[in-house]
Amino acid sequence: MNESASGEEQASMFEIALLLAFCLLLAGICALVVVWLAVAGRLFSLDGLTLSLICLTLGGFFSFPVFLSYQKGELAALVRHCFKRSSAAQPKVPPEPEKSSDAKTPPE
């Protein structure tokens, strides 16, 4: 019973990947808003400063789980798992047998 309880508590790789992808998407959107404000020239107005501080705060909030998973090693394990799965999905071509040149030479 103790093993099943620990299995239920532990998040699967899919859940971790989904969470990290969602957090990275939202942090990227927040960073893009700040870049858009800088390019449009509205960064140093009162509204631009307020919006940029809010977006930077939200971006930091959403990038924090990615940072924690990097520190715990979950991110590296997730990347290894994805690459291992993609390389296993590709069919392996068996090597061709080597042809020996000794069979073609006539005996002396």
Image (cartoon, helix red, strand yellow):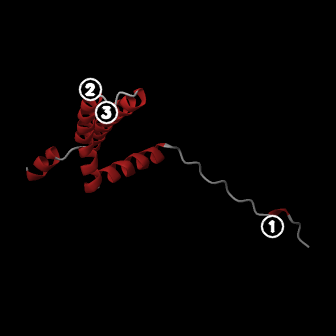
Q: Which mark is residue 47?
A: 2
Identity, as a three-letter code, of the amino acid under mark 2:
Asp
Residue at x-position 45% and y-position 44%: 86
Q: Position of residue 13 (x, y in %)?
A: 28, 44
Q: Position of residue 82 (x, y in %)?
A: 39, 46
For the residue carrying disc 3, how many other residues have a C-alpha within 10 Å: few (<14), some (14-19), or many (20+)? many
Q: Quadrant of the C terminus?
A: bottom right
> Foreground residue, 108 or 54?
54
Q: Which mark is residue 30?
A: 3
- Which numbered disc flags the more N-terminal residue, 2 or 1? 2
Contact check, label 2 and label 1, Cβ < 8 Å: no
Residue at x-position 42% and y-position 50%: 84
- Which numbered disc flags the more N-terminal residue, 1 or 3? 3
Image side of residue 105 versus residue 36, left or right: right
Return the residue found at the far right: 108
Q: Which mark is residue 102?
A: 1
Regarding mark 3 in the picture, which secondary structure is present there? helix
Q: Which mark is residue 92?
A: none
Q: Position of residue 42 (x, y in %)?
A: 35, 27
Contact check, label 1 and label 3, Cβ < 8 Å: no
Identity, as a three-letter code, of the amino acid under mark 3:
Cys
Regarding mark 1 in the picture, which secondary structure is present there? helix
Residue at x-position 53% and y-position 44%: 91
> Foreground residue, 73 or 67?
67
- Which numbered disc flags the more N-terminal residue, 2 or 3? 3
Q: Quadrant of residue 22?
A: top left
